[in-house]
Image (cartoon, helix red, strand yellow):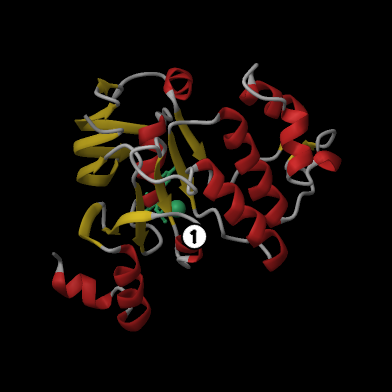
Amino acid sequence: MSMLQVKDLWVDIEDKTVLKGINLEIPYGETHILFGKNGSGKSTLLMTIMGFARYRVRQGTIYFQGRDITHAPTSERARLGLGLAFQRPPTIRGVKTADILRACAGDRVSYQALAAAYDFTPFLEREINYGFSGGEIKRSELLQLLAQDPALVMLDEPESGVDMENLQVVGEIIGKLLQKDRRRPRREKSGLIITHTGFILDYVNADTGYIMMDGRLLCSGNPREILDHIKKFGYVECEKCGR
Ligand code: ADP
Ligand code: MG
């Protein structure tokens, strides 16, 4: 049994078919990386696995730890152990960062201690993401995930818009989320991470990478080799190859 298994997944947004037959399996303790051009469907895949209503599953099945969650509500998926950090998290006026961190943490951990460990205490009383810098938004998002402590960690471009100063912290939190310090089988967490820069590869033990192209997953292989290839040739060669 795997942490996540996606079988022949077809997804529509409004009347556009965005995902066209995705197959993906992530074993326990493994982290998989998604590369691909803008608009190829990467965020759609993560949002669909998390169960947001806008993403309509037309065909296919999503299994989490052997259980069919294809039509489960998002709240149930979060309780079961799926977690997602958004590419562009919303600003929420009137709700304090402390409130969402407390909700994520439940009685698992002290959210104040978490915030203190990552220099985030000054942000607790501020409204969620209101006036935050790009790096602060990503740190807040990742701290929420740390508080939630999901078994499957999904990250949508966690390094985008993050300055050098915050990059290090972002990398450290991601390493912690994915139990980078442990080896399998002691490492239980699995990851599915979208990245453009590959910066994240220094902070996680990534096992497999893919290129998303026009709603299909191509070219499964060593993530560093795939990244080198993209840097050298762009996605043009992938379009020709189509493997
Ligand atoms: P990526 O994350 O790879 O950049 P997305 O999954 O965000 O790609 O988008 C895939 C495709 O779905 C794009 O063509 C995008 O325009 C379209 N799309 C995403 N969200 C919506 C939406 N809310 N309404 C209509 N089309 C959308
Ligand atoms: Mg995206």
What crowding class fits label 1: few (fewer than 14 Cα within 10 Å), some (14-19), or many (20 or more)? many
Res. 93 in view: no
Quadrant of the image containing the N terminus: top left
Image coords of residue 120 (percent x, y): 78, 43
Residue at numbered disc 1: 200
- Nearer to me, 200 or 215: 200
- The amino acid pointed to by label 1 is Ile
Is 68 left or right of 175, judged from the image as shown? Answer: left
Is 220 left or right of 125, judged from the image as shown? Answer: left
Q: Is residue 222 above or below residue 33?
A: below
Is 139 left or right of 132, judged from the image as shown? Answer: left
Q: Is residue 105 above or below residue 40?
A: above
**Residue at (66%, 21%) from the top-left corner?**
103
Q: Is residue 62 above or below residue 171?
A: above
**Residue at (47%, 24%) from the top-left corner?**
78
Image coords of residue 139 (percent x, y): 67, 48
